[in-house]
Amino acid sequence: MRRLWLCTLRDRQEKLERVLAFYKSSKGSPFQETSTHVRGEFDAVGALLMIGTVDVSKCNAIERAIRTGIDSRLTFETTIREKDTLVAEFVGSVRGQKCILGSSLSLAKVLYAANISDWCSAVAIPVGDRCRDVAVPTSSREYQQEVAKVIRSKVLLPASQKKERGLTDYSSFGPPRLNQLNGSGIAVMIKKLNTVASLAQFVSALPHSSSVLYRFGTFGQVVCQLSSNTKLSILGIHKMANLSRQQPRLAAMSLPFSFLQRSGHPQVSLVENYFLVGPLAMTLESELDESTRIGGRVETNIASPEYLKWAVTMSDTSEDDFGWGLSLGGFLRGPRKCNRFHVESFLNFNVGKKCKLQPGLLYAMDEGATQFSALIFRASWSL
């Protein structure tokens, strides 16, 4: 009897071992044996304004020049099928808010980058799409970060979220418009020889009084490597909007679409189509050595070509040593009228490899009447 029980137990053990061996040899879930990288970021900016009484016009000028407060985010990056990448980003607080306490973590971005070939990749962003997510990196330091990701995941990824930062948007090397939230989007990135191109389409739905505003946009960028240290970037954003009649609001990520509906139908929902913005920007960047960069950009609008934004930025921000930065920028309305002027300089101190301190000075002139200076301190920490 005891021998029979032992034989039965051995048979069951052999069956269990065969089942486990089958699951180990099969492909299984695409998430099987994948690694997830977690990155946390904390970014705080404070300003001591050298200004008297603050009225509405001065408040608006300050908010256009400086975004103070705290940015805190947590990013999860997972490699799938050894070639694709899934990114989920959670945000606790955002700079520019009136309250410094922030809120609980909320989902801010979901991004999936898929490899098609060695020279082509596609990106889908159902939540939290920004043009920066699908833009082509122009810095060699950022490009090296992307090459490391390509080696690890074998996919041509969009520009990294971790950018070289100055005190304000003027001291960044890319147009600030790239940081605007667009909703949901898809993109394709193609690389051939010394040229990289990116094309994206995005859509969003926003409540507008008693109606719903549907925004559709197209983003395109071409980056050319002029020499070993110089890159030229040309980008454009085209946006259209449809304002609908009052109707029940659909759930998130649901958009009504019908090409069979006649325009004269009494239940037609769209009542107004109009053009929002059509900015065009050109940037030229050159790297003098591994840490020293100089760049300039100009930006105009198709609807109002007399408006011109410009900026010139120089920086030397080594990852292991002391650094500095200087930026000039402005906004012109016509050939002889300067509406805004902005100049800032900062020092860069790296405390280890994960913490950065940036004290600096800023002077801004807005609409010719409002002028102010500010002492700014920026601290960022990552893990």
Image (cartoon, rainbow, N blue to C red):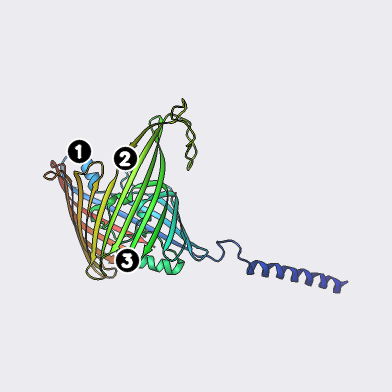
Residue position for label 3: 194
Q: Secondary structure at mark 2?
A: loop
- For label 2, count other residues whose C-alpha is less than 10 Å away and answer few (under 14), some (14-19) or many (20+): some
- For label 3, count other residues whose C-alpha is less than 10 Å away and answer few (under 14), some (14-19) or many (20+): few
The answer to whether the residues at label 3 and label 2 have Cβ atoms under 8 Å apart is no
Q: Secondary structure at mark 3?
A: loop
Residue position for label 2: 276
**Which is in the foreground here, disc 2 or disc 1?**
2
Residue in the foreground of this view, choosing between 269 and 367: 269
Residue position for label 1: 57
Amino acid beneath label 1: Ser
Amino acid beneath label 2: Leu
Q: Is residue 305 left or right of residue 42?
A: left
Between the residue at mark 3 and the residue at mark 1, the CA separation in whole angstroms equals 46 Å
The disc, 3 or 1, on the residue closer to the chain's N-terminal end is 1
**Which is in the foreground here, disc 3 or disc 1?**
3
Amino acid beneath label 3: Asn
From this viewpoint, is residue 101 visible? Answer: no
Q: Secondary structure at mark 1?
A: helix
